[in-house]
Amino acid sequence: MNKVLVIEDNENNLKLMTVLLKNSGYNIITAKTGREGIDMALQENPDFILLDIQLPDINGRDVIKEIRKSGKVGDLPVIALTALAMSGDRQEMLEAGCTGYIEKPIDTFRFIDQMKKIIGDADENPDR
Amino acid sequence: MGTYHYDLDDISYIGSIASIPETGWLVLVSQTTDNAYASIQTVRTYFMAGLIIAIFLVAVLAILLSKTLIRPLSELRSSTKDISGGKYDSIVPTYSYEEIEDLATSFREMTSTIQNRENRLLISEERFRSLVHNIRSGIVVHAADTSIIQSNAMAQKMLGLTEEQMMGKTANDTHWQFFREDGSHTPLEEYPINQVIATRKLLEDHVVGVYNPESDDVVWLLVNAVPEFNQTGELSQVIVTFIDISRRKKAEIALFESEEKYRRFFTTVPSGWAYHKIIVNENNKPVDYIFLEVNEAFEKATGLNKDIIIGKKVTDVITEIQDSEPDLISMYGEVALTGKDKLFELYFKPFNKWYSVNAFSNKINYFITIFSDITERKQVEKELEKHREHLEELVDERTTKLEERTEYLNKSEKALRFLLEDVNEIRSDLAKANEKLKELDNLKSMFIASMSHELRTPLNSIIGFTGIILQGMAGEINDEQKDHLERVYRSGQHLLDLITDIIDISKIEAGKMETIIEAFQLDLLIYDAVDSFKPQINKKGLRIYVTAPPDIQINSDRKRLLQCILNFLSNAVKFTEKGEISVTVNENNGMIIIKVKDTGIGMRDEDMQKLFGSFVRLESHLKTIALGTGLGLYLTKKIASDILGGTVYAESILGQGSTFTIEVPKK
């Protein structure tokens, strides 16, 4: 339970999360667009997904809906990464079917703990 | 001594006895009745025969007479009947016998005489009737019992009754309505007819008003009533004649009223009024005058008594008049003699009064004065004159001032007009500027919105990667490197806070801040807030106390309330170097009162006032170490009032500490 798909268009954020996740022993696959992310989610069988909701092609809500529609990965934990001020977005994402959310900007000192807390609800804690 | 019959042996005898005086002897003589009456029988027989012959002869004579005498007489008798029946043209035939013809002739003459007399009588009666009928006086003849037995057309017209209505009407008839001259009802005994009956004397020129039902008005009559007596001296009838004097009467009343009116007018008119006669000397120069008549106002205005002065000379009444200035007697004399009227005002020294006098003449030597006492008016005028003079001075003074002021105002007006033009220009500029400001405001909103993403994204990378290096994920770092990186990290964090505050404020100001009202437990929120400051509090060696009733549930925006409490705590920790910080929660009347009290540096009163303004950084010796955005309290106040519907306030004593309070509705 350590294969994680990170869908994020911002290079810096992607790199930051990659470093944090690798440092915690996760296997990482990445996608930079919504389309690419959906495809990878269906093909690569990740254990959970970190999804930035502001993507250049398809917005995060539609990405979740698309993933939830497919029977194969319908119950995959999805953690939305939302802007701090956008509480409306969070509500929208929860309604669309995400498992939980982490506010951006991420706190590098707390990020892994926050993430584990969410997927722990959906699955057992992976090893560090 | 008498005669007597006796029968003897069926033979009737007739005898007579007589006494012989002084002898006592009676002598009886008798014989049979047949014997006695035999001669009488013979005479009777002769007489009867003669009678029969006489009757026969008379009959023959009568037949003759009837032819010659009785017929003409009978014809005369029938003519008499005719004449008495009014047939004066009945023909009396001529006769041959002289005596009868004489009789007939005298009869004819008599008839003609009678006929003439009768004709004259008819004419006279006709004239009389016409006179009575046409006379312009009313004539009513009353019987002794007052009932009317005759009336003429004029009477009927004046009384408004027909002849039939008049006939038989008595004085007692309730139909009559008589009036006295003063308008009161005439009592029955005063009726003209009743007066005449009572006095048996002629009633002359009695005036009476009678209600005329025809014209529905009272007609005034001048009545004369004449009683007539029969041979025995009894009153037989009363002849009442009358004429209509209504018009005269009305004129009289009008005249009386008019006279009365003018008399009253002259006596009661408020102007003094007097009628005088001028007295002239032998040179026809006026030297005096006499009061003939004055009214009440004259008495009042002059103080002279009417009863005393009438008929008196003015020089006797007012001796000073001869010395009066102007010479009143001469002036009035001129009016009385020339007929020219005068109108003047006069100060009359003897009375110490002012009069307005109008003098005029209605006939030569006489004059009338009409005047009023104008003393009071004169005094007022004098006063007014004084005031007017003073007023004129004042007006002059004021006018000068006013002119100066006007000039000044004109200048001012010109200046104002220029100013107004400038103002209009400025206003137009302002409107333009306002437009621009609105554009700029929009731009600001757009700028802030984009800043929220564009500024924070790179900043997040800076903070994020600094954090990774600090955590040693990119390899070992020495203490100096760590210290530097921590400074980068804190500055980045500070910058991020600043940006976040700015975004929040602009959202609240634009009314676009989202509010999420939810139920939560307040004490837990307080502990959460306090917990996040624990490391700093411990580091500074401060103590912290929380006094909150357990299980307080409130309905509010949790995140924003937390933000406010965090801001208070942040300030308390920042400005307190020793002592303690306490947080207390109370509930009062549906409001939750949260106080954060510290024992820090406190604030000056003048600083308190600008405390909740934006970008406020109070001067303090701790300035260098007190990091902050300068927006914290401003944002807190905005959130409390605009988002939470509450208030914030602060109390402080310089050098002793501050207390910040937020009150929000529980629900």
Image (cartoon, coloured by chain):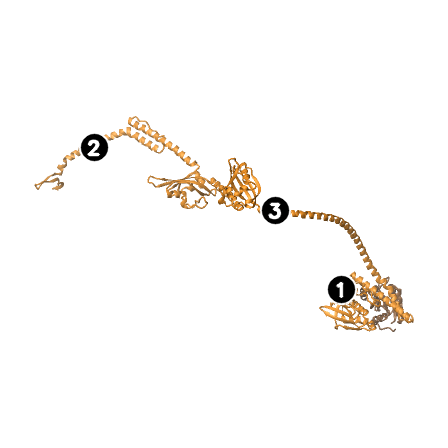
Q: Chain of mark 1?
A: B
Q: Secondary structure at mark 1?
A: helix
Q: Which chain is brown?
A: A
Residue A58 visible in rendering: no
The orange-coloured chain is labelled B
Give the mark nearer the N terminus: 2 vs 1.
2
Distance from disc 3 to disc 1, alpha carbons, whole Å, reads: 77 Å
Whole-percent x and y of residue B28? 10, 40
SS of the residue under disc 2: helix
Query: According to the image, label 2 marks what residue?
Result: B51
- Which amino acid lies under the numbered mark 3 shown in the image of this protein? Lys
**Residue B192 visible in image:** yes
**Mark 3, mark 1: which one is toward the viewer?**
3
Residue B280 lies, in percent from the top left, at 51, 37
Same subunit: marks 3 and 2: yes
- Residue A95, quarter of the rendered image: bottom right
Q: Is residue B287 above or below residue B601?
A: above
Q: Which residue is mark 1?
A: B641
Mark 3, secondary structure of its residue: helix
Q: Report which residue position mark 3 lands on.
A: B382
Q: Is residue B308 left or right of residue B119?
A: right
Q: Earlier in the sequence, mark 3 or mark 1?
A: 3
In the rendered image, residue B411, in percent from the top left (x then y), is placed at 75, 48
